[in-house]
Image: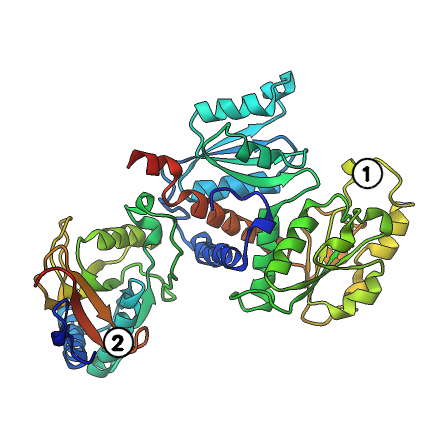
Amino acid sequence: MRHLLSAGDLDVDAACLILDTAAQLASVTDRSVKKLPTLRGRTVVNLFFEDSTRTRISFEIAAKRLSADVINFAAKGSSVSKGESLKDTALTLEAMGADAVVIRHSSSGAPHRLATAGWIQGSVVNAGDGTHEHPTQALLDAFTLRHHLRAGTGDLAGLRVAIVGDILHSRVARSNVLLLRTLGAQVTVIAPPTLLPYGVNDWPCAVSYDLDDVLPHVDAVMMLRVQAERMHAAYIPSVNEYSRRYGLDICRLGLLPPHAIVLHPGPMNRGMEISADVADSARAVMVEQVTNGVSIRMAVLYLLLGGMTDEDRKDL
Amino acid sequence: MDSGFTDSARSVVLDAGDIGRAIRRISHEIVERNKGAADLILLGIPTRGVFLADRIAAAIEQIDGEGVAVGALDITLYRDDLRLRPARALESTAIPTGGIDDKVVVLVDDVLFSGRTVRAALDALNDIGRPRGVQLAALVDRGHRELPIRADFVGKNLPTALAEQVRVRLVGFDDIDEVTIEGGAR
């Protein structure tokens, strides 16, 4: 594995290797010295063209726990706001010797371009590109599901997962559908017809418009944020109506089987797609998702950078 | 193949009986050196060191009557040769509850060779806590040290050539107890 661009690139073995590695690395969080020497001397650049708190900090902590040097590059306040292209930014980073670039970009496909254009030698990790993919989020969700519902080992065969909300704009949904399918889970996406993408019937998942219909038959439900910044057309009649039909409130929580858990990739709009009492309930695992995110990103960085790289091979 | 001696490239140096006796002797020595098993923690280095540690712990319990804490210490993330090979899968680390602070840690590995694994294990211990002392037990010491490291408890000193391979098989992970030397010209 050289880059991590899409959850669809991972087969069962690769996905399980990342999950198993993350499970071992999770114990570092409980130690007094939360640091491993593994990536000493490697440089990881966080290249964020779009706002992010959770993901950027998560990657930063993960890289630092592995002793890598981290450079945070936010588009705001950099030469990108003066009109620099992705190519020139990439060439600059390459000249400074980045071993891995973690990129978030508002354009779908930007990480792929960065990885394949030959501008940089290092590994590229997709930290969310437009409405396309967010593979480390899908991995941390799978890790959380596995921990709660599969005793922390193996794949997710037979697990039933509902993904609810703005499927159209959600890179989290795309990556999760692909990865959960690979791991053997059965996924149902639920949204109003206006928030389902064209061609969703070809996705490896079931599609439903009715949340109450599906909830009694799932092991986990993943609520997605309604992305106000991407709502440029009249997708929903009103916030209230959306919330009533597709929001997870305490009554709907009662429809779930007793063992089922509630996930949300964050940031949450309390009162819109999820009510505050559900978000704070014992069934909600959002805080764990954040913790698991650090372990998953450590695992990804370790597997991409921890062994022999192309540069090392050249030196031999 | 029931006996390695029929094959010139492979010879059995320890059989199941030898390994059992070596484990019992190592266990006695550990108890003797530490005047009992209190405050002892055995940490096996994966893969086979873990099985060896379990068996030494069982033997110590028979000798001393008291159970001894056993765990596993994966040293992959502390290796000095990570960049020479593609990234490896991690093994499990299990530190007994209570941690290693002020305890005597006995590292257990199957073969002591260059000493680099033990160096990595000492670094790993350093990040986990501050033991009162660290000792090293190995089933086979095959020589060729590249670092100033020695074992406190050795099952068998085995002079080898660098080209030879020492293979340890232990019941639990493998189907038999056996130590063999393979390859090289003997």
Measured from the top left, where is residue A89 in percent x and y?
A: 55, 23
Measured from the top left, where is residue A227 in percent x and y?
A: 76, 42
Q: How is the image coloured?
A: rainbow
Toward which corner of the image does residue B162 lie, by quadrant?
A: bottom left
Residue A262, can we see it? yes
Where does the C terminus of chain A fall, quadrant-wise?
A: top left
Q: Amino acid at mark 1?
A: Met
Q: Is residue B123 left or right of residue B181?
A: right
Q: Which residue is mark 1?
A: A231
SS for dot 1: loop
Labels 2 and 1 share a subunit? no
Residue A251, can we see it? no
Measured from the top left, where is residue B36 in percent x and y?
A: 19, 74
Picture residue at 46% right of the left edge, 41% below the top: A63
Q: In the drawing, what numbered circle is on residue A65? A: none
Toward which corner of the image does residue A188 lie, by quadrant?
A: bottom right
Picture residue at 11% right of the left edge, 75% below the top: B5
SS for dot 2: helix
Chain letter for mark 2, please.
B
CB under 8 Å between discs 2 and 1: no
Q: Amino acid at mark 2?
A: Arg
Q: Nearer the viewer, residue B3 or A25?
A: B3
Q: Is residue B64 left or right of residue A74?
A: left
Picture residue at 55% right of the left edge, 52% below the top: A10
Q: Which residue is mark 2?
A: B55
Q: Label 2 to label 1, Cα distance in Å? A: 63 Å
The local crowd at label 1, few if under 14, some if 14 to 19, many if 20 or more residues have their Cα within 10 Å, is few
Q: Is residue A316 left or right of residue A2?
A: left
